[in-house]
Image (tube, rainbow, N blue to C red):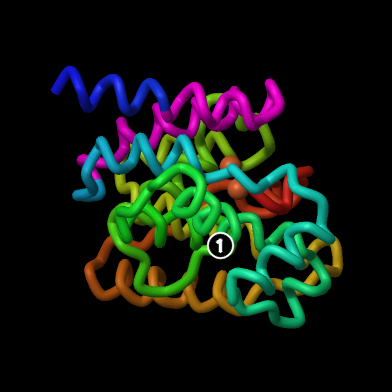
Amino acid sequence: MGEKKALVTDLEKTVADRLSRERWQHTLGTAVTARRLAPSLRADPRKAWVAGLVHDLARDLPSAELLSLARRFGILVGAMEREAPELLHGPVGAELARRELGIDDLEVLDAVARHTVGGPDLSPLALTLYLADFVEPGRRFPGAEEVRRQADRDPELAVLWAMERTIVYLFRFGLPSHPLTVEGRNWLLRKLREEGRWQPWEGGARGAECDHGIS
Ligand SMILES: [Fe+2]
Ligand SMILES: [Fe+2]
């Protein structure tokens, strides 16, 4: 156990050295929140901590570098990614975590790869990371508080609301939604409706005032 703790501490230091101070604050908030939310989504808290730590490893890379790394790593670059290369920071970051930090847990790498646009059939760990990234204590944009409160009641419903907020935000600013975000929303909406757990998003149009389109 002592050895495991030392490894995690090494990982924290390695990641902290690679990120700006603001990005590290957000990263730590996401990792702590992911570890806390994990049990309620039936995810492993230790994996959630690691996923939170590495999720934004590639977030500050320039667009040209994200595009060139994606091509080198064989990551699919579609029309959406060409228009907004920062969407690639999830899959590129996952590959950097694997190659440079030695993270080999496939569930962790998948959660990191999918944390930006989401998608259908997310694993418990991917749901945990997506939600933690949205509600970590540093997030202050409109809509965050409703999702944060819902995260402690029904975390899957909170993920649905987070995806809807993202779609509404992009709609309001005349921007296209990633097809995977829409598919993810449809997937969760059907699941929650079938299980009688669906409720409309409390944030409504206010969530669209958010100044943060890509997390
Ligand atoms: Fe991110
Ligand atoms: Fe993030």
Q: Is residue 207 magenta?
A: no
Q: In front here: 146 or 76?
A: 76
Residue at position x 76%, y 81% in the image: 79
**How far across and down, in percent of the image, does residue 17 sit?**
61, 24
Above or below, comparing residue 22 to residue 124 in the picture: above
Circle 1 crowding by C-alpha within 10 Å: few under 14, some 14–19, many from 20: many
Side of 15 where 80 appears, left or right: right
Query: Is any part of residue 147 visible from this angle?
Result: no
**How far across and down, in percent of the image, does residue 28 sit?**
50, 26
Question: Secondary structure of the magenta portion, mostly?
Answer: helix
Q: What amino acid type should be assigned to the residue bearing mark 1?
A: Pro
Residue at position x 45%, y 46% in the image: 131
Q: In which quadrant will I find the N terminus? A: top left
Side of 76 where 169 appears, left or right: right
Residue at position x 46%, y 42% in the image: 101
Q: In front here: 64 or 205?
A: 64
Residue that label 1 marks: 91
Side of 80 where 195 appears, left or right: left
Above or below, comparing residue 60 to residue 168 in the picture: above
Q: Find numbered disc 1 in the image and state the secondary structure of the residue it sits on.
A: helix
Query: Is any part of residue 116 visible from this angle?
Result: yes
**How far across and down, in percent of the image, does residue 153 sit?**
30, 41
Q: In front here: 38 or 18?
A: 18
Q: In front here: 18 or 52?
A: 18
Question: How many discs mark residues in the rendered view?
Answer: 1
Image quadrant assignment for residue 141? top right
The span shown in magenta is: 11-40
